[in-house]
Image (cartoon, rainbow, N blue to C red):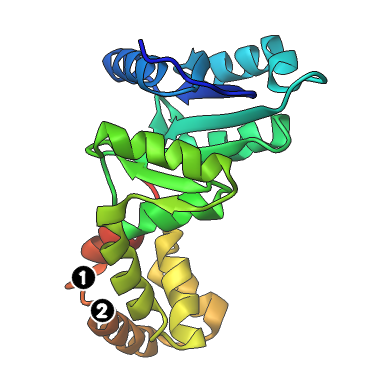
Amino acid sequence: KKSYNTTMQKNLILIDDHKMIIYGLKCYIQHHSAWSVLFTAASKTELLQNLSEYKESFFSESEEVQNIALIDIKVGDSDGYELCRLVKEQIPGIHCIMYSMYSTYGNIMYAFESGAEGFLSKEADENELILALDAVSSGKVYIQQDLMKTVLVNSNKMSLLTRREKQIFDLLINNEEKKAICQELKITIHTLENYLSILYSKLEVQDMEELKKKYGGKV
């Protein structure tokens, strides 16, 4: 094991329900970085229990403490985005990095909207995980390097939407039915279909299914 010269305590919590992934991450992190895995959690219930049990470990009067949670976007029956918000409410000052097999623009943006400071794909190189931990702990935002093009391209497409188009986009992503959208916006179904045609063209998708797959924030 490498020796690291550090004057601070670096706590990492791993939130994922895949045991092999947790085991691999824990071994790699503890042998290749200055971070220590404080605990792991495979469900919301286990997370709440551990946050309560280890609460004093997140703070110290004698040394500086850095805390990061690495969270899968889907943990059993729980929504990882919800768990990110929960962790931040329970532990003031903690940073969160979300990761997933599904590295769509929607998932990345939803992670940051939920309070995360970083996003990684589960296909990321191990070294990039360490880079992400160090960047986020120093107050920076980190997105996996080969995902940046996806973020920039789709952000540019989103910037082309008018206020009304963005309004309709948000309702669609939140699974509102077309009839409900028409009632809320006081428009006809014909007008909505016209907006949808423009939306699909600007965002370069073929239909509603592709729109939600690329831009939705749920798995």
Check disc 1 and give the amino acid type.
Asp
Check disc 2 and give the amino acid type.
Tyr
What residue sits right under mark 2 in the picture? 200
**Is 162 placed above or below 122 here?**
below
The quadrant holding residue 60 is top right
Residue plotted at (39% across, 21% down): 29
Side (left or right) of 120 relative to 47: left
Side (left or right) of 150 relative to 165: left
What residue sits right under mark 1 in the picture? 207
- Closer to the camera, 69 or 193? 69
**Is 46 placed above or below 107 here?**
above
Residue plotted at (54% across, 38% down): 96
- Closer to the camera, 78 or 178? 78
Residue 135 picture location, percent across and down: 49, 45
**What separation in Å lies between label 1 and label 2 (alpha carbons)?**
7 Å
Residue 14 picture location, percent across and down: 46, 23
The quadrant holding residue 151 is bottom left
Residue plotted at (42% across, 82% down): 159
**Is 138 placed above or below 19 here?**
below
Contact? badges 1 and 2 (CB < 8 Å): yes
- Closer to the camera, 71 or 149? 149
In the rendered image, the quadrant that contains the C terminus is top left
Side (left or right) of 107 relative to 47: left
Side (left or right) of 5 relative to 123: right
